[in-house]
Image (cartoon, rainbow, N blue to C red):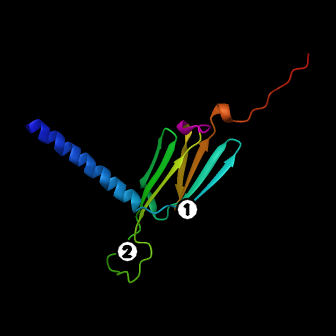
Amino acid sequence: MSNNIQKSAAAASAASAYEERSRLSETALTPAVDVIEDAEGITLYADLPGVSRDKLNLHVEAATLTIEAESDLAVPGELKSSHTEVGLGRFRRVFTLSKELDTQNVAAELKQGVLKLRIPKAAHAQPRRIDVRVT
């Protein structure tokens, strides 16, 4: 019986964690993103104001790219905010990636609140020149 209680507690804990993640993902801001494609791949620029490297999480699983971040912007202790338009400092955005992209070689750079992701095309999807021999 004790084992069943432990399993139930573990299941409840997992369900609680899932609900918390779901609630947080629902209350996150969607960052503005620009995507530029060229012959070698795509470059994605995401606006993440006030986000530091340690508060940024990037995940690629199968064909899904997830960007999650938390802003470090806070009102200094001696000041009191009289009006706040954006009080939520959490960002989340999910993308479905093409199978033509090489998700093993994603390069990321965070500079002045802008995340730059470079995702190259897989070798089989990149354009290539075919030499013709004259015989």
| SS at circle 2 | loop
In percent of width and height, residue 65 lies at: 50, 46
| Label ID, residue 129 | none
Which residue sits at x=59%, y=52%? 44
Which residue sits at x=8%, y=37%? 1
Query: Quick check: 4 above or below 42?
Result: above
Residue 73, image quadrant: bottom left
Highlighted magenta segment, given as a residue range: 99-104
Query: Quick check: 14 above or below 89?
Result: above
Q: Are marks 1 and 2 in contact (CB under 8 Å)?
A: no
Task: Kindly report the secondary structure that dominates the magenta region of the rendered protein.
Answer: loop
Identify which residue, 94 or 84, lies in the foreground.
Answer: 94
- Alpha-carbon neighbours of circle 2 within 10 Å: few (<14), some, or many (≥20)? few
Q: Which label's residue is closer to the chain start, 1 or 2? A: 1
Q: Quadrant of the C terminus?
A: top right
In percent of width and height, residue 74 lies at: 38, 70
Q: Amino acid at mark 2?
A: Val
Q: Residue furthest top?
A: 135
Identify which residue, 12 or 62, lies in the foreground.
Answer: 12
Which residue sits at x=17%, y=45%? 9
| SS at circle 1 | loop
| Label ID, residue 75 | 2
- Alpha-carbon neighbours of circle 1 within 10 Å: few (<14), some, or many (≥20)? few
Q: Amino acid at mark 1?
A: Ala
Residue 22, image quadrant: bottom left
Q: Answer with left or right where residue 34 lies relative to residue 133.
A: left
In percent of width and height, residue 107 lies at: 55, 44
In front: label 1 or label 2? 1
Residue that label 1 marks: 32
In percent of width and height, residue 116 lies at: 57, 53
Which residue sits at x=37%, y=80%? 81
Measure the C-alpha gap from mark 1 to mark 2.
Answer: 23 Å
